[in-house]
Each structure stands twice: as structure tokens, then as C-alpha cells.
Amino acid sequence: MTMPTNDTIVWQRLDLPGHELCSVSSGEKGHLLTGSSIFVAKGHKCLLSYRVVCDAAWKTQEVHVVGNINDEPIDVVLMVEPGNVWTLNGVEQPQVEGCIDVDLAFSPATNLLPIRRCNMAIGDSEQAVAAWLTFPEMTLEKLPQRYTWLSESIFHYSSSGGAFETELTVTSSGFVSNYPLLWREEHGE
């Protein structure tokens, strides 16, 4: 799969009212994933914007999520220190120590990170353990994941030891274009 350096996608939520716009760009020092999501979930009216900074190997370095859940302002800063030590708003998070990727619970955007980082061939399978930013709590939990590349644009995805499984359709950039029952790329046609 050839993966362009810069791309933008718009998703429509399928399980709830909502949309998201996300862009990925790459430079000499690393990669940047930015986006904004607007949706209604569990009675919460949400507008969340995020910025995920990765190094040249697609390892998460810092994450910033801002916005509102109902009338409550959200301002979450995650930093990854040497040794994959994570902090949330300056407080160390030992429960996710060693994680390489962030997974934003409210977005399909961060599935791109292990897909780009693992550099798999069709038939390969990779284990990834993400620091999962929960929604609406905005706390961190360890989330074991497995990605298996089935065909040119299909990955089998499982998390929590197989408690959740699905097949993700991805674009040539590595963005999920179809996350069954949850997200679909919006073409505006």
C-alpha cells in the first residue's frame, strides 16, 4: 500500500449524529494528525479538536484535545517522555507506561498511527498496545490491539484480547474509510 504523506478525510458517524474532519501531514522531523469532531453521545453535545504529534517512526510524542462536552471545557495535554512514560495534564500515568500509540475513543483517526508505524505486508499481523483516552471521562487506560493486513485495503482489527473485532477498510493514506457500524468516509456526492 502506498501511503501519501499529506491527506484529509471527512467521516460521518453511523451510530450517533456527528461528523469529523481529519488531516495528516509529514515533515522531516515527524508527523502531525489534526482534526475536529462534532457529535452527540450519551446525551453529551460535543465539539472536540485534537492534535497528535508523532516522531519520524510514527510513535506518539504529544497529544492535545480541546473543546467542550456540553458546557464543560475540555483541555487535555498528553506528553510521552523517554521510556514511553505518559503524563496527562502534567500527572504521570503509570497504567499506560510503555504504550507507543494514543487511541482517541471518540475518533477513528488514531487507527492510522499503528497502520502507518508497523510497515506490514499483506498477511502480516502486529500487536499494538495503545494509551486509550476514554470518552467522556478523558482518562487513560491501556488498550491491547491487533492489526492484521488482509488485502490491499482491508485490516482485521481486534482489541481487548478479541472482545471487540471488526474489519476496517482503509484509504491509501492509512485512514479508516469504513469502520462498520461506527464511521464511514463522507464523499459529499
Image (cartoon, rainbow, N blue to C red):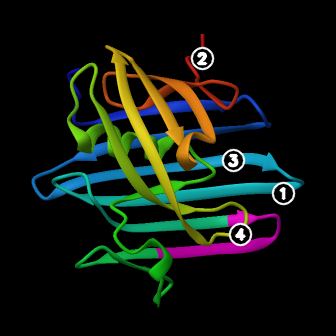
Q: Nearer the viewer, mark 1 or mark 4?
A: 4
Provide the secondary structure element on which disc 4 rests. loop
Magenta-highlighted residues: 68-77
Residue type highlighted by circle 1: His
Residue holding disc 2: 188
Was residue 6 drawn as part of the magenta stretch in this picture?
Answer: no
In this rendering, is residue 89 above or below 186?
Answer: below
Residue type highlighted by circle 3: Ile
Q: Position of residue 67 (x, y in %)?
A: 64, 65
Q: Position of residue 84 (x, y in %)?
A: 30, 73
In the foreground, 141 or 103: 141
Which residue lies most toward the top here?
Answer: 189
In the foreground, 60 or 24: 60
Was residue 74 drawn as part of the magenta stretch in this picture?
Answer: yes
In this rendering, is residue 118 above or below 172?
Answer: below
Distance between the alpha carbons at the discs numbered 1 and 4: 12 Å
User: Magenta part mainly helix, strand or loop?
Assistant: strand
Which residue lies most toward the left here?
Answer: 28
- Mark 2 or 3, nearer chain start: 3
Residue holding disc 3: 38
- Mark 1 or 2, nearer chain start: 1
Provide the secondary structure element on which disc 2 rests. loop
Distance between the alpha carbons at the discs numbered 3 and 4: 17 Å
Provide the secondary structure element on which disc 3 rests. strand
**Which residue is painted at 23% across and 31% down in the image?**
120
Hey, which quadrant is residue 136 in on the image?
Answer: bottom right
- Checking the image for residue 137, the label placed there is 4
